[in-house]
Image (cartoon, rainbow, N blue to C red):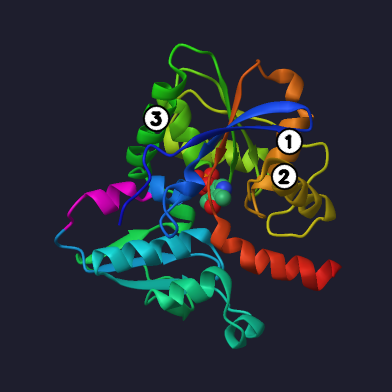
Amino acid sequence: MRLQLPSPVTHVRFAGLEVVLKRDDLIDSDFSGNKARKFWYFLENDLPHIRHLVSHGSAQSNVMYSLSVLARMKGWHFTYYVDHIASWLKSHPHGNYAAAHANGMQIVEGPVPHHFDKETLFIAEGGRQKEASHGISMLAEELRAHFGDEKVDIFLPSGTGTTAFYLQQYLPWRVYTTACVGNSDYLRKQFRMLGGENARLPIILESTKKYHFGKLYPEFFKIWVELKDQTGVTFDLLYDPKGWITMLENRDLFSDRICYIHQGGLRGNESMHKRYQRKYG
Ligand SMILES: *Cc1c(COP(=O)(O)O)cnc(C)c1O
């Protein structure tokens, strides 16, 4: 496998705003985006005692898919626990779910065990682990090498906040984000869990309207299509619409140069796109 690192940087203009894109979506067709950064440590290091990878979360998650790729590359078994798999998904496998199966994932509906043997590597939901700092520090290094002494504001949408948090630890510039999973309080809690009291935290911005994670909103689909048409770049349908809406609503806060981190997740668009089609035709 040949990973495209450092990931490319491109320039786009959207809604009158000049934005520099850090294209982590282009790292690789299978192992890409911020999940590649977050799981980089496990790819790079040998870990000869590990034979089994275990994680949990939703049945269409980007983490699940990326871990299935990691497990395949490492020759590990991969077991993934979910609360529930919709019967429609079982009978019509698609998106991350189908792709992770094709990589050999074993999916289990039921509770996550409390204990694992020494041969098992357990990854908490969303890939929220300190090893993520390793790959994210490499992303920060690439950004520093690209921008040098220029001042730049960084923007990226957050789930667990792991990427935004570590990026802020390794960058001299301000990192701005918005909470896509839960609200700003949830995200602040995540930051505190990752960093303790003295860490420098990303700035959390809010959109005028409240959005719930995984729900469908006509304005999300609209901005996703407009971004694709006007910039030629396909973004993800779960996090990026809230990211762009929030960034544009708060544009007065930013300096001349803003860099948006494209965190990949495009494999998950298949299931989101199907849901939008079924709901809005
Ligand atoms: C996983 C993911 C995120 C959220 O990353 P966190 O580190 O959990 O904040 C954002 N965007 C995309 C496309 C993702 O796949």
Q: Which of 258 and 61 lies nearest the eye of the viewer?
A: 258
Vertical side of 90 occupied by 15: above or below: above
> Is residue 29 left or right of 90 when viewed as pictured?
left
Q: Which of 5 and 153 lies nearest the eye of the viewer?
A: 5
Q: How many marks?
A: 3
Vertical side of 216 occupied by 94: above or below: below
Residue drawn at (83%, 50%), measured in percent from left and top? 219
Q: In the rendered image, is residue 115 in sight?
A: no
Say what secondary structure mark 1 lies in. helix
Q: Earlier in the sequence, mark 2 or mark 1?
A: 2
Residue 252 on image: x %, y %: 76, 19
Could you tell me which quadrant the C terminus lies in? bottom right
Say what secondary structure mark 2 lies in. helix
> Is residue 80 left or right of 177 when viewed as pictured?
left
The magenta stretch spans which residues?
Answer: 39-47
Viewer-side label of 2, 1: 2
The furthest residue to the left: 48
Residue that label 3 marks = 142
Residue 196 on image: x %, y %: 43, 31
Residue drawn at (37%, 64%), measured in percent from left and top? 69
> Is residue 202 left or right of 206 when viewed as pictured?
left
Residue drawn at (72%, 44%), measured in percent from left and top? 227
Tag shown at residue 227: 2
Q: Amino acid at mark 2?
A: Leu
Q: Amino acid at mark 3?
A: Glu
Residue that label 1 marks = 246
Query: Quadrant location of residue 16?
Result: top right
Specify whether residue 21 is painted magenta: no
For the residues labelled 2 and 1, the Cα–Cα distance comes to 14 Å
For the residues labelled 3 and 2, the Cα–Cα distance comes to 25 Å
